[in-house]
Amino acid sequence: MSRARVPLHIPGVPAPTAADAPICLVHLVRAANRAETFRRFAGALRRCAPGVQYELVLALKGFSEEREAAPYLAEVRDLNPEVLFFPDTGFDLGVYFAAASRLGRSRYCFLNSFAEPLAEGWLAHLETALALSDVGMASATGSWNSPRSWALYSLGLPSPYRGLMPSRGSAREQFAQLDAEREPSVAGASAGAVAGPSRVAGALLRLPRAAVAAVRAMPMQLREFESFPAHHLRTNAFAMAHSTLAELKLHRVIEKSDAYVLESGRDSLTRQVQRRGLRAVVVDRAGGIYDQDEWHRSLTFWQRSQEGLMVADNQTRSYQRGGPERRQMLSTMAWGPSADAG
């Protein structure tokens, strides 16, 4: 029996907030991660100039006291960040919503704890796209991956992935390698580790005990996710106006499934933005803007060598360091017949 989700409302922007104020860059920092993870972000922020004026906010999650966060803050003291503390519960989207409620800025760019800017002007590119009157959400990556279709394929049932994906044995080996390589605490770091909700279906390819748990989760996957292509912007690095966020139908992010649904479900952030007549776009490192049917051409996520990617994260790195078999499997999960692993 599915758990009822708790609705969440984000207040509108207070009147004094200037529309032309700098974009608010909110970066999630988790105490459960290695300190090197944050140092990688801080170094990248200096190497790859954002290209636009911004206000840096660190959303510190799971730090018991300010003293514990001191080494992290020392890394970016010269950037004069604002600091917000959050308990070590829930997932990244929940922290973003809570931060927006506290901050009340006009525009945000949210970066998860594993985000790493790769190209100069990356933030300016996202803000330029968001400034277009018909754009409601802009992200560094997007995907057509469908947890529903992948789950059906894993069970040997009719699915758009049939005939495209590797054998079950090959997929099992790839998932095992991905599990072994996953960064510490990554399971709670974002809306999903490699392949997001498809980890549940991936369990069907592995251990009997994991398969039992995956079967129990199947009704939710079939009910709450679209068939391939299930267009959704990934939430590792995305920009949105406060006014848009405040209009969306949100819920508290308590369990992984809550985050999965908001990122890639039938009622995802992407789908809600589109229902309001606004575009949800992917932006590449050259500032190119792509609508959903062209996302695969941006070369930003699980496609060729991800030449267009401007903000990396744990999932893009897992693809980048993989061999031909892994790349082909992941590219096909994301893009189906349009996959091109290079």
Image: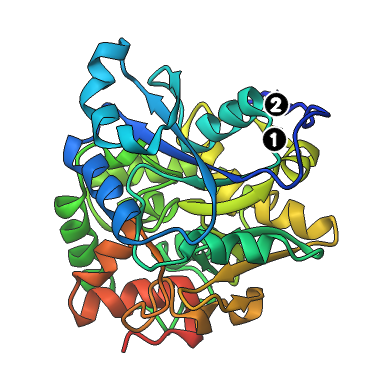
Q: Quadrant of residue 188?
A: top left
* Rendering coords of residue 210 (x, y %): 29, 43
The amino acid at mark 1 is Leu
Instruction: Give the number of the disc on residue 45.
Output: none
- Vertical placement of residue 277 versus 53, above or below: below
Write the residue at 16% across / 54% down. 181
Is 42 left, or right, of 49 in this rendering?
Answer: left
- Vertical placement of residue 200 versus 184, above or below: below
Is label 1 in contact with label 2 (beta carbons under 8 Å)? yes
Q: Nearer the viewer, residue 228 or 23?
A: 23
Is 317 left, or right, of 218 in this rendering?
Answer: left
Write the residue at 31% across / 18% down. 63
* Rendering coords of residue 256 (x, y %): 46, 36
Mark 1 lies on residue: 250
Q: Nearer the viewer, residue 288 or 290?
A: 288
Q: In the structure shown, which secondary structural element does the residue marked by tag 2 occupy? A: strand
Mark 2 lies on residue: 8
Q: Quadrant of the C terminus?
A: bottom left
* Rendering coords of residue 230 (x, y %): 61, 65
* Rendering coords of residue 261 (x, y %): 59, 45
- Vertical placement of residue 311 versus 190, above or below: below
Residue 207 in sight: yes
Q: Quadrant of the N terminus?
A: top right
Write the residue at 36% across / 77% down. 306
Q: How many marks?
A: 2
Write the residue at 65% across / 66% down. 129
Q: Nearer the viewer, residue 207 or 86?
A: 86
The amino acid at mark 2 is Leu
